Image (cartoon, helix red, strand yellow):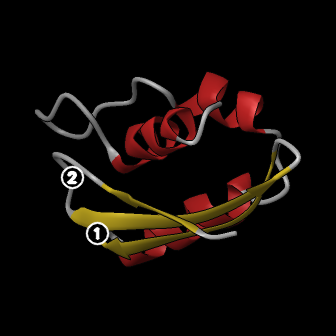
Amino acid sequence: MTYTYKTKGTCSSNIELDVENGIVKEVAFWGGCNGNLQGLSRLVKGMPVEAVITRLEGICCGGRPTSCPDQLCKALHEMGY
């Protein structure tokens, strides 16, 4: 099942993700830095959710207190991880 998360404080506006049995199956960002976010999506595909959160949670972007990777972690938490 695809889950859509509305981001806060980033250039991307939404994240669509699919997690199955604690493994990230698909991630797609709407807006933001296209190349970087495609790369991020491909890197986390197939990873356990816990590993994604451990590596990416708390990353800031410029002067912002969050980032697209951090927002991905917030989406995973909202999904119950």
**Circle 2 is placed at which residue position?**
10
Q: Within the image, what quadrant is residue 34 found in?
A: bottom left
Image quarter where the C terminus lies is top right
Relative side of 58 to 67, left or right = right
Residue 63 location in percent, x, y? 11, 33
Above or below — where is 75 with respect to 4? above
**From the viewer's perspective, is residue 6 above or below residue 56?**
below
Amino acid on which disc 2 is placed: Thr
Distance from Cα at disc 2 to Cα at disc 1 = 7 Å
Give the percent coordinates (x, y) of residue 50: 74, 28
Residue contact between numbered discs 2 and 1, judged by CB atoms under 8 Å: yes
Q: Position of residue 53 (x, y in %)?
A: 61, 29
Q: Residue at x 25, y 40 (%)?
A: 61
Left or right, 72 with respect to 8, comes to right
Element at label 2? loop
Tell me the quadrant of the picture where the N terminus can be found.
bottom right
Residue drawn at the location 67% of the way across and 36% of the way down: 52
Residue 32, numbered circle: 1
Label 1 CA crowd tier, 10 Å (few <14, some 14–19, many 20+):
some
